[in-house]
Amino acid sequence: MTKPNKSVCESKHFESLFNMHSTLLRNYIYYKCGNFNLAEDMVQEAFISLWNHCEKVNYNEALFYLKRVANNKFLNTVKHQKVVLEYSKFKGTEVNNESPEFLYEEKEFMKKLQDAIAVLPEKQREVFLLNRIDKMTYKEIAALLNLSVKAVEKRMHNALVVLREKLGNI
């Protein structure tokens, strides 16, 4: 067997992997657990594990290794807990010309939307958020989650059906 050109054990290659994948991996875990700080901790632990096992991981397969480690850490950490997403509150401009009624309705809608997203099954929620928040294509999501594009489409369709039921026609 030939040795791969890039070694994960070389700090420049490890740093390159961190720069390329840490945000994506953090968002992936955040969408699963709903806790930003916990997601960042899990990503850090995944990269520590990658560094500790760098000689065993092929550079081209590092993302899959990181995803698997982070996902396992997530599953171990939040086992038997109900996942509740926390979203940052809408930050408007300092000057707001909207009526108080409009602002109240907007706030109520955002709460309704957050609640509707929170009750989505985990697999639907992560596909929905990866597509709508991170602007990933179905093909990119399929590659990240090791699914077929059809499976991603089905999850997205089911998520949209549930959201339409919860939110009605807007």
Image (cartoon, rainbow, N blue to C red):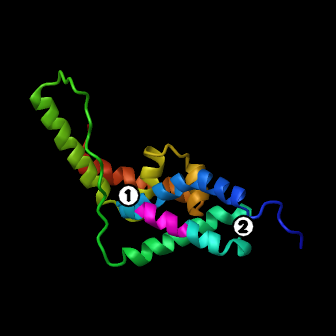
Position of the N terminus by quadrant: bottom right
User: What residue appears at the point 12 percent right and 25 percent down from the top-left corner?
Assistant: 99
What is the crowding at mark 2: few (fewer than 14 residues within 10 Å), some, or many (at least 20)?
A: some
Farthest right residue?
A: 1
Camera sees residue 68: no
Tag 1–tag 2 contact (CB < 8 Å): no
> Residue at the spot x=83%, y=60% of the render?
5
Residue 92: where, in percent of width, then height? Answer: 25, 32
| Near-viewer residue (21 or 81) | 21
Query: Which label lies toward us, 1 or 2?
Result: 2
Give the amino acid type for the residue marked by disc 1 in the picture.
Phe
Any magenta on residue 41? yes
Q: Nearer the viewer, residue 3 or 133?
A: 3
Residue 9, which numbered label? 2
40 to the left or right of 141 = left
User: In this picture, which residue range is highlighted in magenta?
Assistant: 39-46
Which residue is drawn at the image coordinates 39% and 64% (left, top)? Answer: 38
Location of mark 1 (residue): 36
Q: For residue 51: magenta? A: no
Could one spot residue 43 in this view of the protein? yes
Q: Position of residue 60 (x, y in %)?
A: 73, 61
| Numbered disc total | 2
Residue 43, image x, y percentages: 50, 63
Residue depicted at 38% across the width and 57% down the height: 36
Mark 2: secondary structure: loop
Residue 104 lies, with reference to residue 16, above or below; the image says above
> In the displayed structure, would residue 43 be above or below residue 134?
below
